[in-house]
Image (cartoon, rainbow, N blue to C red):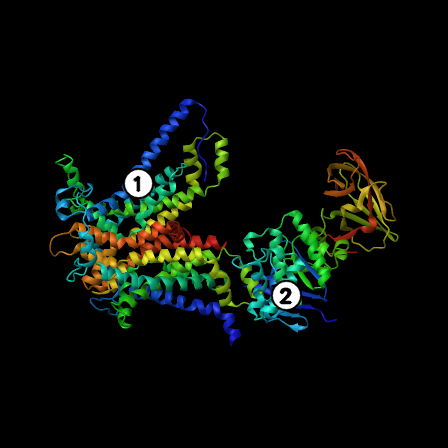
Amino acid sequence: MSEWLENHLPKVVLAPSFIAVLIFVYGFIGWTAWVSLTRSKLLPKYEIKGFVQYERLFDSPRWDTAINNLYIFGALFIVIAMVLGLALAILLDQKIRVEGFIRTIYLYPMALSMIVTGTAWKWILNPGLGIESTVRGWGFENFTFDWLVNPDFAIYTIVMAAVWQSSGFVMALFLAGLRSVDGEIIKAAQVDGIPTWRIYTAIIIPSMAPIFLSAFIVLAHLAIKSFDLVIALTGGGPGYATDLPATYMYAMAFSRGDIGQAAASAMIMMLVVFAIVVPYLYSELRAKND
Amino acid sequence: MTDLSMPRTRAQGTAGKTALRWLLYVLLGLFALYYLMPLFVMVTTSLKSLEEIRTGSLIALPRDVTLEAWKTAWSSACTGIQCEGLRPYFWNSVLIAVPAVILSTLLGALNGYVVAQWRFRGANIIFSLMLFGCFIPFQVVLLPMARLLGLMGLAGTIPGLIFVHVIYGLGFTTLFFRNYYVTIPAELTKAARVDGAGFLRIFWSIFLPLSLPIVVVTVIWQFTQIWNDFLFGVSFSQAGTQPVTVALNNIVNSTTGVKEYNVDMAAAIIAGLPTLLVYVVAGKYFIRGLTAGSVKG
Amino acid sequence: MAPILDIKNLYKNYGATEILKDINISIEPGDFLVLVGPSGCGKSTLLNCIAGLEPISGGTLSIGGKDMTHVSPKDRDIAMVFQSYALYPTMSVAKNITFGMKVRGVDQATQDAKLKEVASLLQIEPLLNRRPSQLSGGQRQRVAMGRALVRDPKLFLFDEPLSNLDAKLRVEMRTEIKKLHQTLDASIVYVTHDQIEAMTLATKIVVLKGGVVQQIGTPAEIYNRPANLFVADFMGSPAMNLIPARVQRNGTSTQVAIARAGGDPIVLTDTRDLHLPEEVILGLRPEDIAEAGFRAGAGVQEAACLVDMVEPAGADTYVVSELGGKQVTARLHAETSAQAGQMLNLAFDMSKVSYFAKDTGERLN
């Protein structure tokens, strides 16, 4: 008995976590998938009715807005955060004396809750008292900056806050990448008399392709899951102008009592994440096993 | 670090280089201001009176520093109908975070130890499945989890939230420890086995004493995640058991009475302070966790 | 005497891949067995199987006369030294050495006595309170050996213990391991990819390739009478010259013809009574080819060869010439006047020649 236990202890130790993951991740995904195929309203029903919920979802103007917002937000957020992060990383890579200190400043927003970030930016962007009134106070009486309450522009305030929060992190990723480039290659290029900017564009940045991919995956993942920031900054408003799939799902699940819709929207979110993350994880794990 | 500074000989080059250096520092300084600005605004606003906020400028320093807003935020601001400030919710967050961090770290250490050092058939698949669990959008488990917590009688309770955070933290904690233990030569385990030590003895006597850095990384990561969580908090809590992030959002969005921006800012700082403190004290480990959690699959 | 280690028909598979095939090895007490082969040949896996760190897929294994096929490592009465030394990083040297005894519940007094004994034997007393990270490579090596010695096991297992040391230290430690073996009269199984280590240390060598035993024998047997082309090529440095040749029986002796660059084939006579196929691979070690006049004996034959290259190596000078389409190395005395591009009379000691089948590579004589 004790011999058996000693031989199988590793499996015994891993089993509870594995079973928990099987149930609470995969089982629950299954449950949600199932319910998304029913006519569940306030309470789940288990009678499969086909893809009605998905049809309803794609017919819903609010979901349409949410998906559009995800495109706008996702694209801008990812591109701006990556460009800014890379630029900051390159600037910081020039033997800066107080690098550690500056890095700390650039990265601290990442330690904050999105709710805190949202609260702060909500105040800064407040049309009556924030930037708008400050600039007017400087004498620009006609200056308006009301994006937060303007349905056409509110989504961009979320981009602003999200970039503020995450670009320092992207910088840290890129900086690590810049530092991991083989020093001898760079020395060789310098000996060949290649100018510094060419060394960056022709040697260093191309060799960081995996880092770009990682940063993209992380940011895309953040974008799809974005929920807290929207709740804190705009609450999805004005109206539902800044709804994202995550807030749509939450509204359906907990305020509208439309579990079927909530489940269907959650499944779509997951499929999007799948489409991005699975190939990445697969290649990472493959690379590791080789 | 790679030295990209090129030797220049001409005097003109040196002058141009100095100018470039200045430009570089100015740019870096401007960006530092950009990142610091919201924090600065939060702090100054929280120290102003409402009157001063209405009449003054966003970026002006407070004329009369007052801690009133902080007091209100801590002990009497209203989150909906209750007006007890953030204090009870702050402690809720502590009560949720501490056990959840300890449990998920411990389990992650054991799991990582198994996956990295006691490879058995199927261990890789199990690890991949657990790893993937890190990446699902949690929306997809919200509904069934809400029902399960209800069935277990944990709906709206702090133990319920601890449970949720442990379950969905396992993937990352396992990943952290696995990636750390994988760098420890398998020969160490072999040597200990020849020496007669068993699975748990090897973990306890050899691996755990080696694990301090990764424990710090994991604890910080988990603490930050759990403290800053909003989705689980807002979905699975009820009045009285809400974590601080949910309470902060309620304070900010409570529609009763006059809008007290200074209180909002003080509350936001209070809610952000623990993780900010962790970041300032152990930033190195925080960053290591961030990069480990995202780069390494 | 009963063999200390007896492996019968051992197989090891990972899934469908066969790592070890039908291994049969047996050693007597006091033997120093070296498992040698190129990387990936299965030698380390075999050692792990002997230690019980890897389960075996078929066959039996006994240590000290007891069947150990399914016994866990801790009960096999073995001790092991690893390539990376595998010292426990958070424990002091003393704790590293006594950890096994502590786990097995040996009383403190015995632990202390054993520790003292081993520390003095290996001259590591001043290091006992240090951490492994504070030790040099050679010191770590000693501590790793101390940890094994303190168990006083039936069988010591060494897994490439010297490959992480620099060249000079490796030679020193090699000598020490040999001395230790002689002092303790211990039974040892030792894995290495370094054939010089194998030759100098072993009382018995097992050459492995692709999970199959190629030859088992004393160092002299392996060196002088390699069982096949692989062993011939693998053991010895520079490697044995393996030259395609045509043979013809002439009475009781054998005529050997070897193609020569820039001339007719050279024909040498082997006076031994051999029965060989017409085409063979002839194996001759570099030291069995000398400059004419520097080697005498019954089997020595001379022939002029075109020198392609001269490589002085201090004590000797190597001369390379193309024979039978191969670069053939001869080991000459250091003061040779041989020059590249010139003809040189070489003396071939035909009594030392090994013949191998051209198709199977097996030894023929």
Q: Label 2 amino acid?
A: Lys
Image location of residue C199, percent across then percent down = 72, 54
| Nearest the eye: B18 or C124 | C124
Q: In the rendered image of this protein, does residue B26 appear above or below residue A152?
A: above
**Is residue C298 rendered to the left or right of residue B240?**
right
The residue where tag 1 is placed is B32
Q: Would you identify the image quadrant in which residue C65 lies?
A: bottom right
Q: Amino acid at mark 1?
A: Ala
Foreground: C116 or A46?
A: C116
Query: Which x, y percent locates residue B235?
Result: 24, 62
Q: Residue C220 in the image: x percent, y percent?
A: 77, 56
Tell which of A120 and C321 is nearer to you.
Answer: A120
Identify which residue is drawn at 38% across, 28% down: B18
* Residue A178 image-quadrant placement: top left
Q: Would you say C24 lies left or right of A185 here?
A: right
| Category of crowding for the residue at label 2, using alpha-carbon neighbours closer than 10 angstroms: few (below 14), some (14–19), many (at least 20) | some
Parent chain of label 2: C
Q: Is residue A226 above or below residue C26?
A: above
Q: Which mark is residue C114?
A: 2
Horizontally, residue A90 falls left or right of residue B199, namely: left
Q: Chain of mark 1?
A: B
Please identify the quadrant where the C terminus of chain B is shown: bottom left
Can the viewer see residue B112 in this picture?
A: yes
